[in-house]
Amino acid sequence: MEIRRGATTWLLAALATIGLTSRATAAPTAAETCQAAKNIAAGKYSACLQTAEAKYVISSDAAKRADAMAACQTRLQAAWAKAEAKAAAQDADCPSFGDVATVQSVIDVSSDALANSLGGGGAPVLPAARPLKTAQIHCFSTSSTPGAIPCAGTGQDGEFQAGVARSYQVIGFTVRDYATGLEWEKLTDDDSIHDKDTWYSFDAAMAKIAELNSSLYAGHDDWRLPNRFELETLLDLGGISPAVDTRLHQCFAGCTQLICSCTSGGDYWTSTVGEFFPVFGTTVNFTNGGVDFSLLSDPLATIHVRAVRGGL
């Protein structure tokens, strides 16, 4: 009888503990639900691609394989949009946003490597990171009369649109690019250290970077001047003046960092110095997407600065 009473007491205590634990476990947030939905969608997309590959192995029907993979992509994109829309409807942000093209690209590359390996190609090896898309979607006449023409058969960038799509997210004081792993300073139009219209000599550019680090800008002390290739990843060659994605050019007079994200046309300093003529520093022009050079020792240089971190 005593044993039975003790077991009952233990059972009641255990049930009470379970109840308390259950009540203490918070429901997932809208952001967590979005992230989980994307995990599931990414997994289903990967499985869908491998199913298409399996059927191709048996049938050797390339057209059916292409159609099946296109259907996989459509389902992934629909699931992604649904997850982000659901979070937005609850006034929440997904931890990542607008990144379906980048995620799809990563899974595509992994799936191709796996399919090749299973077909006798050796251990699956992922290729090195691919260049970004230039964002140019138009093609142009090569005659003396300039103008846009249909892209088919031109061999121009706008026909192939090769590369990985960039994946920007504006967060607080910075802009993150999940395609490159870089985090960028947001520029403003408010006469602060972040103002888009401020010009710098090379030494002054380095002084700005030092000030950002000493003040723990955006909570970090590892800001630096981007190298040439890093800065070129911000170029959007589908536009001009400035040649950047719209998320880097949401700007109006007087706007501050938390409100806007500005970019001026003109040259921006990089940390890359010319080996052939080391008195010149490399700059990237955000009016036309070109690359220029400026004297490192010129105290009156009219070059802009945007700091970067990450990617190391």
Image (cartoon, rainbow, N blue to C red):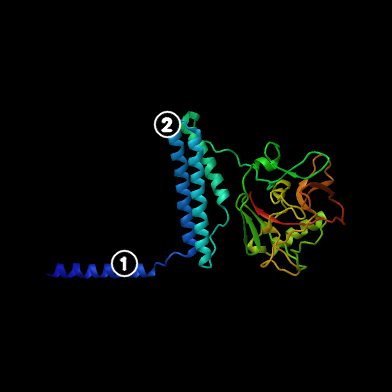
Q: Nearer the viewer, residue 118 or 26?
A: 118
Side of 4 relative to 58 (left or right): left
Is residue 113 in sight in this rendering?
A: yes
Q: Nearer the viewer, residue 145 or 134?
A: 145
Check the image and report above or below for 312 versus 171: above
CA distance for labels 1 and 2? 51 Å
User: Mark 1 or mark 2: which comes first in sequence?
Assistant: 1
Amino acid type assigned to the residue bearing label 1 in the image: Ile
Amino acid type assigned to the residue bearing label 2 in the image: Ile
> Residue 137 bears which disc, if any?
none
The quarter of the picture where residue 199 lies is bottom right
Q: Quadrant of the N terminus?
A: bottom left
- Label 1 sits on a secondary structure element that is helix
Residue drawn at x 47%, y 51% is 41
Q: Nearer the viewer, residue 280 or 149?
A: 149
Q: Position of residue 246 (x, y in %)?
A: 68, 57
Residue drawn at x 51%, y 46% is 73
Q: Residues within 10 Å of mark 1 (few under 14, many from 20)?
A: few
**Most distant residue in the left direction:** 1
Q: Are marks 1 and 2 in contact (CB under 8 Å)?
A: no
> Residue 18 bears which disc, if any?
1
Q: Position of residue 105 (x, y in %)?
A: 56, 45
Is residue 216 in sight in this rendering?
A: no
Q: Residues within 10 Å of mark 2 (few under 14, many from 20)?
A: few
Q: Position of residue 197 (x, y in %)?
A: 79, 62
Q: Nearer the viewer, residue 138 or 201?
A: 138
Residue drawn at x 50%, y 58% is 82
Q: Which residue is mark 2?
A: 58
Residue drawn at x 50%, y 62% is 86
The quarter of the picture where residue 249 lies is bottom right
Check the image and report above or below for 6 versus 293: below
Q: Nearer the viewer, mark 1 or mark 2?
A: 2
